[in-house]
Image (cartoon, rainbow, N blue to C red):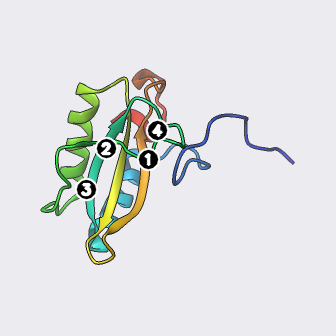
Amino acid sequence: MKTLPKERRYETFSFLPALTDAQIARQIQYTIDQGYFPCIEFNETSEPETYYWTMWKLPLFNATSPQEVLNEVQQCRSEYSSCYIRVVAFDNIKQCQVMSFIVHKPSANNSSGSGGYRY
C-alpha cells in the first residue's frame, strides 16, 4: 500500500490532488448555492496556530457566480503572490465560517501546471 508523500497539509481538500480550475469553480458555486458568502483571505504563513488571516476586501455579499470570486482571487494573487490565498465561506445564519480551502500556495509556480493553484 502506498502512503501519501510526507508534506505539509493545509485545510479542506489538502489530502486530495490539487483542484483544477473547474473544481474550484464548482466548490465556489456550491457555497453560493447554499447561501454562504464567499470571502478571499491571504497570509504569509499557513501555520495551524495562525487563526487570523487578512481579508482581501469585504466578503462578496453580492456574488452570484464563481467567476466573480475567481476574479477577486486573481487580483489578490497578483498583488500578494508570495502569500497563501484561500476562499472562505461564511454562514450568516450560524454567524460563522463554514468552509475554507487554499487556492494559491506561494511555492506553486504557474508554469508547473499545478492544477487549481494557477489563480
- Secondary structure state at the residue bearing disc 4: helix
State the separation of the CA atoms marked 2 and 4.
Answer: 20 Å
Label number found at residue 8: none
Crowding near the residue tagged with mark 1, few <14, some 14–19, many ≥20 C-alpha atoms within 10 Å = few
Q: Given the image, on which type of amino acid does mark 2 rest? A: Glu
Label number found at residue 115: 4
Q: Which residue is mark 2?
A: 41
- Secondary structure state at the residue bearing disc 3: helix
Outermost right residue: 1
Q: Given the image, on which type of amino acid does mark 1 rest? A: Tyr
Q: Earlier in the sequence, mark 2 or mark 4?
A: 2
Q: Earlier in the sequence, mark 3 or mark 1?
A: 1
**Residue that appears at 47% across and 27% down:** 108
Crowding near the residue tagged with mark 2, few <14, some 14–19, many ≥20 C-alpha atoms within 10 Å = many
Task: State the image coordinates of residue 12 (x, y, percent, origin top left).
Answer: 51, 54
**In front: label 1 or label 2:** 1
**In front: label 4 or label 1:** 1
State the separation of the CA atoms marked 3 and 4.
Answer: 17 Å
- Quarter holding the C terminus? top left
Outermost left residue: 62
State the separation of the CA atoms marked 1 and 2.
Answer: 12 Å
Q: Given the image, on which type of amino acid does mark 3 rest? A: Pro
Q: Given the image, on which type of amino acid does mark 4 rest? A: Gly
User: Contact (CB < 8 A) between labels 3 and 4?
Assistant: no
State the separation of the CA atoms marked 3 and 2.
Answer: 16 Å
Q: Which residue is mark 3?
A: 66
**In front: label 2 or label 4:** 2
**In front: label 3 or label 1:** 1
Q: Which residue is mark 1?
A: 51
User: Contact (CB < 8 A) between labels 1 and 2?
Assistant: no
